[in-house]
Amino acid sequence: MKKIISFLIFTILFAFSSFSQEIEYKEHEFFNKLRQYKDSHNDSLLFYANKMKASTSKCDQMVGMINEAYFLYRKRDYVNAKKSLKHTITKINELIEKHPNYSCLITEKANALHRLFWTLKNQEEYESAYKQLIKISEINTTYNLKPALTKKVNVEISKAYIKYKLGLEEESKKILTQVIKLLPGLYELSKQYPYIKPKTKEANIYNLLGETNLSLGKKTNTTKFIDSASYYFDKAYKLAKEFSPPNPDSEFMYALKKTEILISKKKFNEAIALTDTYKRISHKKNYSKRPEYLNKAICFHNLNTTDSAIFYANRLLRTPELKKTNLITAYDILSNQYVNKNQLDSAYKYSKLTLKEFNEAKEQKQITYQLLYDNDIEKIKELNRSIIQKEKKKNIGIILLAVSVVILISLFFLFKRKNYKKEIETIVTSKNELILKNKEDNTNQKVAYNIDDELEQKIIQEINKIDTDLSFLDQNFTINSISKKLQTNSTYISFVFNKNKKETFKQYYSRKKIEYIVDMLKKNKLYRNYSVQALAEEVGYSNASAFTRVFKKHMNVTPSAYVKSLESN
């Protein structure tokens, strides 16, 4: 009996020691300090990371190692940050083999992989970065790590970023739009877990939406995307100013994004003036001039100020650990500007380097895109397998239910058949009489215009379709585009249109366009930040003046005045 009691006491003490080991790092005296200084004071971050590394708790040690790597990441020393994180992940895997019951080790492995993702992303190693996301998703699914919502948000934001970098901006925006719907839950969760920073996540989402819209603006040369990007960057910066503790990089990062906006709007002199403020607002001891050199090289290149463009492009090339995209930009500027100077040897040299780096970058993107595709396909296959399993379990019940339903329907049908048949015959007779009457009336009316019923119906169907799918907002939409599609005369379309809509083609669609943009301005505050040109493009006008005239005709005020009236209400 004594042996049994001793064994039970030993088991309880061992379980308690294991439990305390697992929760210890959550209550460690330095843990909250790390969270406090994570994004605000790099030296303090390293100090407490080393304190955690010296702990007797294995989980604390891993937290310390991850935050030491984050210290390097914050210094933009991505090479050593990557080495540190890979070493940490190896160490965590070894510890998991020895202590499989320590769930904190699983959590820290997911954290280390996520930090490695961002490190690889900043080195533009997108294939390797995406592989880390796959591993994190597997861990989250297998172990159901808490809080699950935070883990899901982190992974989805990361996926959206990769898709944006691969040029899949619309897909990125769809992911982010869905993640925004999870934010209320994240804010609620932060009441239970104070270390969760929902404002930081929200700011990250808005910044990434800004980046995707900016990229679409550059691709399509469309003003509304540039205006949307500016709107989201402003929104993110407004949130960043509310961070506690404040992030000292917020103002500098915002200035970088506003510079991109100015460059996209071809306001190069304003962009150069903004780059001159970088050093003052960076708050960094080791200020890097890389962004200043990059943006000045781009601006002077577009202003065709050859010597200045070459000067800053060369300065950019001399900065350490230059990203491939920046390298391509510098080479491209130099090759073009040396052509302007008629120095063809130098132009050819940099042109070859541009092509070499571009092909390497393109190949890397293709590999990552395939990885992205394969992973999505596997998820679809897994979903299909689970559906099949569930369906097998339901088959017997479904068959029995189906047989019962068929019997009941059959009985009901037999009972109602006679009455139902009479009702149908009555309806069909009435409908046929009405169709014959309408056909006679329409025939009498259309003989004079030489338009048959079938053609008129086609035209009416096409008009209704246009109203539904909003294709009238397209810049190339005209009455001729309809006539071409239906292979008929635009005069016929005009006649049928006037008869059915009681307005001319131009009057009707001018009104519809203004009604659409007014509705969007009322419902979506984002549109109120668009320029008049962007609003015009949204409804198919290439010219802001023409749009303003039509808007004023229908609303009795200009677009700008109308937006101001909405804001004041």
Image: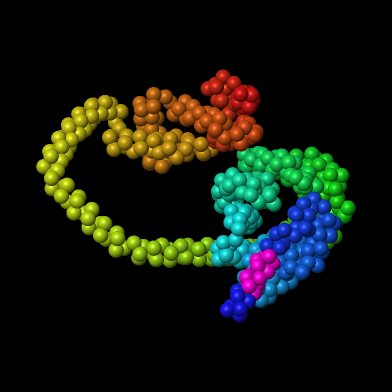
Q: Quadrant of residue 563?
A: top right
Is residue 160 something that shows in the picture?
A: no
Whole-percent x, y for residue 245 in the image: 77, 46
- Please state the extent of the stretch shown in magenta in the rendering: 9-22
Residue 26 is left or right of residue 292, and the answer is: left
Query: Residue shown at 26%/26% (left/top)?
Result: 445
Residue 147 is left or right of residue 341, and the answer is: left
Is residue 386 something that shows in the picture?
A: yes
Query: Residue shown at 47%/39% (left/top)?
Result: 471
- The kind of secondary structure the magenta stretch mainly shows is helix
Query: Residue shown at 68%/49% (left/top)?
Result: 194
Residue closest to the far front: 1
Is residue 11 a member of the stretch shown in magenta? yes
Residue closest to the far left: 418
Whole-percent x, y for residue 348 in the image: 77, 62
Query: Residue shown at 69%/67% (left/top)?
Result: 21
Residue 267 is left or right of residue 446, and the answer is: right
Residue closest to the far top: 556
